[in-house]
Image: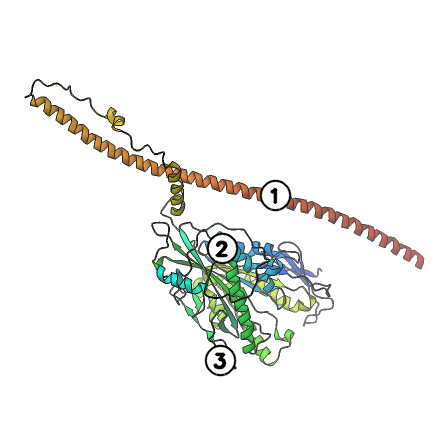
Amino acid sequence: MSSRKRANTPGRHRHAKRADDRDPVQVTCRLRPLSSNESEACVVAIDEEHVKLVPPAGYILRNGLPPVETTYKFSAVFDETASQRMVFDQTSLDLVQDVIKGKDGLLFTYGVTGSGKTYTMTGTPKNQKDGILPHTLDILFNSLLSRADKCIFVPDGRNGFEVQPEGVAMLERARLALRTPCSKFEFKYRIPDTRAVRGANDDYVYAVFVSYIEIYNNVAYDLLETTPLVERGEKPRPPTGKGLHQDSKGNMYVDKVTEVEVSSTEEAFEQFVKGQERRRVAQTMLNAESSRSHSVFNIRLVMAPLDASGCEPVRDSSLLHVSQLSLVDLAGSERSKRTENTGDRLFESGKINQSLMTLRQCIEKLRENQKTSPDRAGQVPYRDQKLTHLFKNYFEGQGKVRMIVCVNPSVTDYEENVFVMSFAEQAQDVEIVRAVEVNFGNGNLPVSRRRMAQWNNEIESALRGHNDGFPDTQAFSVFFDAPPPFELNGPGDSDSIARLRQHYQSTYRKRQDYGASAEQKVTEFEGAFRSYLCVADTHRRRVEEMEREKAEVETENQRLAAQFRQTKRELTALKQRVSKYELAEQVKSDKEEEFKR
């Protein structure tokens, strides 16, 4: 009997059909490299979608039986050689595009402490190993076609935003300009991601806001909150916990959280580093030097339609739309038995495990509810923990939900990895209602108002001095009857004069009517013709852009093909060397056997 079994593939064969308006939670798995002093792994990547959980030698279950190898399937598997960019492209790139299109997204990193969660999320930008956060910020800012001036939009304190008068915004910008940088984080040697995604509407302006919170011992803390100054010798005050509120649309948010407007990756990452510094200070003040807590970095994109001029955003706050991407670095999922915590550390570990257990219970309840009718569905325990309560809207259809399971393949983490894999198996069995597409209409125009205005300005500049004006009256002579003969029988021939007067008055009226009609048709034709030319010009530019992209892709494909051929040659050479060594070893073994005889 084989000692290997394949775990159930969640959501693949249990339900023959999936509702057209639902998508499964996408769960990917990333394996970190073994430490230099380790050689045996308990988790091995089989291919791009499967991993194998291998029990360590001599490991015995509680029932006294040896465990079996188990295979798990994921949306994608990243082995030790996977680059940061590869992980980002397959797990998060489409989330950035969704945010630009007005939809929300939630990304978790889950695993035991030391499995690579934080490295996956943030990376080490100074060493050119950007994680998901820097890549997300780079591509987001690269993709926004037009951004509003700073301070035009401000948080309203109720999870929404308001539009400020231009005068007030100018004063705010002047005040911000006087501030000194709050972080010494250096981007000097970092190579940014220069890519962009489509989806931004040219008839909208955008602004980016970030916030950073921590959930520790089931209390939410604002890591960007400005703390009051203290007198010399006085101890700093501990951070204040924040409550959760529900906005007018039913979305959960952290009350009175600090949201900072940023205009570049550097500014956003500066706020992240600032939050990290305050997180360390807060942990010290909370007696939590080695604390395990959940961190949530929120990126909110505020978008407003342009006014009729196509130059300024509308001042109506009700027309604003806000999308959000939440990047969540979950605390380590290990149990207290492994960490050997006692006292405060044990209490802290218990709180963390409670929140993760509640997350697991929510996942389980969602799975159960999918198998029953809506009227018999049980209540999902979101409210039991701040973590699940804050993100309950995502599981109810607010946006996409992604999870990256980070795994340390060391044999010492085998038991923990069993629990991690079990949770991942359940999570990807949950189906989330697909978010509704946001309609950013532009009045049925073939191109955006901004693009049309820009193109018309270019045309006007090109045609300046070449306009011949409206046609002369000679052009309309073919539309009129020939005038009566200009003959008078005498100075008193009033009948002839009346006929001439009537003819020319009628001709004049017809000319006015024809002229107005022709001018209107010319204007309409010119507008339609310009519109078609603008669309054609826009399509031509797009074709040129796509041709450049195609050339870049072909170049990259050629590079990868060459790399593949080189790898294949190296693999063939290695196989030949291995065969040679095996043959030599076999000959040696045969000689030893012959010698023993």
Say the numbered circle drawn on residue 555. Answer: 1
Residue 50, horizontal then vertical, whole percent: 63, 56
For the C terminus, the quadrant is bottom right
Residue 461, horizontal then vertical, whole percent: 39, 39
Q: Amino acid at mark 1?
A: Thr
Residue 347 vs residue 577: left or right? left
- Which comes before the other along the chain, label 3 or label 2? 2
Residue 63 or residue 311, whichever sits in front: 311
Q: Amino acid at mark 3?
A: Glu
Q: Residue 406 falls in which quadrant of the image?
A: bottom right
- Count the marks: 3
**CA gap, disc 3 to disc 2?**
40 Å
Determine which residue is flagged by label 3.
Answer: 231
Q: Can residue 451 be seen at all in this image of the molecule?
A: yes
Determine which residue is flagged by label 2.
Answer: 141
For the N terminus, the quadrant is bottom right
Residue 295 vs residue 310: left or right? right
Q: Residue 350 falls in which quadrant of the image?
A: bottom right
Q: Residues within 10 Å of mark 1 (few under 14, many from 20)?
A: few
**CA gap, disc 1 to disc 2?**
26 Å
In the image, which is nearer the foreground, mark 1 or mark 2? 2
Q: Secondary structure at mark 1?
A: helix
In the image, which is nearer the foreground, mark 3 or mark 2? 3
